[in-house]
Structures are given as structure tokens and as C-alpha cells.
Amino acid sequence: MTELNPERARRAIVEHTGRLAESAAAAGPDAAVPTAPEWTVTDLVAHVGQTQHWTAEIIERRVTDPADMPTDVPDLPGDPDRWPEWLAESAVRVASAFSDEALDAQIFNAAGDDRSGARFWLINVLNEAVVHGFDGAGAAHLLAAADLPEIDAGVAAELISHHLAMLTSPTWAMLRPESAQAIQGTGQTLRWLATDTGDGNGAWFVERRPDGATWERENRPADVTVTGPAGTLLLTLTRRVPLGAGGAGVGLGGAGLNGAGRGGVGVEGDAALARHWLDNTAHIAD
């Protein structure tokens, strides 16, 4: 798996967490989060800040055994005016925890892939900041239908790889067995193809096998191909942007199923296969 430059990832964590803080202030604590319907902005801010503190402790303590994971997290300040400072502190703490020495230390990797534990958690925290930053912008009504997601293509590409690594990991099969079973298959294939990475690494090939789904960063023909900017593909995979419904896609910019519009996605081939994948790979809370 191609890895994002750690310094770039650290900066992006702080940047996207800052965007969330700005959105939360604009939306207000009781605002609903359209892309996470069971949450308010208060829930969103608490989740991101507490996850960052929780992850920082994992890295700081060099946790190698899942049984030793942190059990306590700081409470969200009751005064929303303190949230920007609280989020800034959590972002800086977790970004700083990923020192060059920590990146190669022995730390538990929940995906069970070939990354070091710290490199796994670095991208996991970045994913939280980026995706929930988008959630916050939606809650604050800062995104119009034609807006392009403000997500760097290289960052988004790494987060797509991370997303697929988690969905096909033993941890996912243990925590979400119904999802892992649903994305098994008999050889059906999906290709996610980014239009803006410009480095030959913007393609992901997924195969649904009887013993589980597999993926590789490979550009091969598939039963269905979903094409669009890497940021929009990420938001589609994480169910923030709809693939489409009833035969007419409605991605960002009004994209239809047969072609990607400005910032939208296009789907060629078996669209029902892509929808089935998305319907069965949602996270419970986020």
C-alpha cells in the first residue's frame, strides 16, 4: 500500500479538525448533521476530539495488545465557545504523537495489514478528521450542491485505500460479521477510478470472493466502474455523497449514472453491484 507522507498527514489532521471547529461554531451545538442523521453537532465534536485523545494515548503508550486500549477520554467542554480550543488541543496532541520514532514502533494495527500500527492509526485519525469535517460543513450549510469537496486528491486516495483495508480486515469481520458476509461473492468485481490523482495510483480493484472481499490498488476492468475525483469517491464510499437512486444518479454537481459532472461520479456497468457494496459497508456510528 502506498503511504501518505507522514508530515503531510499530520498537517492535514490539524487543518481538517480546524475546519470542523469553524463549522461547529457556525452551525451551533444542537444542529442536526445531515450525513450522520442520529447525531447533533455536539455529538460530532465530542466524537472527533475524544477519538483523537484516545488514539494519542494508544501511540504515546505504544499499545500492542487490544486488551490494553484506553478506556477513558476527556469530557467535551460544556461551553461551546471552548470547543475550538479543545479540538485544536486534541488535533495537535494526536498529530504530535505520530513522531518519526513512533511510526515504526510496535503498536497494535486494527486492520492487520502490512502497515506499522502507528501508520495505521495516523491514517485512521486523518480519515476521521476529513470525513467528519465534511459532516460539519453540511451541518453548517456551508456546502452547496455544486461544491467540490475540499479534499486533497492525494489525501483522499490514501483514505480510500485505508477504507478498503478496514472493510476487508479480520477486525471488520469480527465487529461487523453481517457486513463482511454481505460483501462476499462469487467473483463479482468493482473498480473505483479517480480522475485527479495524476500518479497512476488512482484505481482500486475489489473482488467479492466466497471467502471474503479482497482489494488491490490496480486498474483492471470490472463489472462496475465508479469514476470521479478522489475526494468525491471517498465521500461516496463513506456514504456522504449518494451514488444515485432509481436509475438516475445524483452525485455532487448533479452527476448522472452515465457520466461524472462537476465533482460528481459516473457509473459504468452494473450499478446495482456498486449500490449493494455501499449499502452493506456503512459504519454503525459514523
Image (cartoon, rainbow, N blue to C red):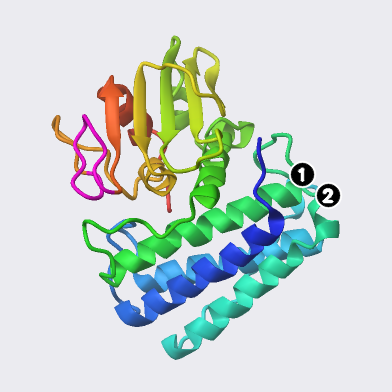
Considering the image in quadrants, where does the N terminus appear? top right
Identify residue for label 1: 116
* x, y percent for residue 45: 46, 71
Q: Is residue 63 visible?
A: no
Earlier along the polypeptide chain: callout 2 or callout 1? 2
Identify residue for label 2: 104
Contact (CB < 8 A) between labels 2 and 1? yes
Magenta part of the chain: 251-262
Vertical relation: 17 (above or below) 241: below
| Residue at image coords 38%, 76% | 24
Which residue is more in the foreground, 114 or 284?
Answer: 114
What SS does tag 1 mark?
loop
Which residue extends farthest front?
A: 198
Which residue is more in the foreground, 109 or 244?
Answer: 244
| Residue type of the residue flagged with mark 2 | Asp
Vertical relation: 185 (above or below) 120: above
Q: Is residue 4 visible?
A: yes
Residue 254 within the segment the image draws in magenta: yes
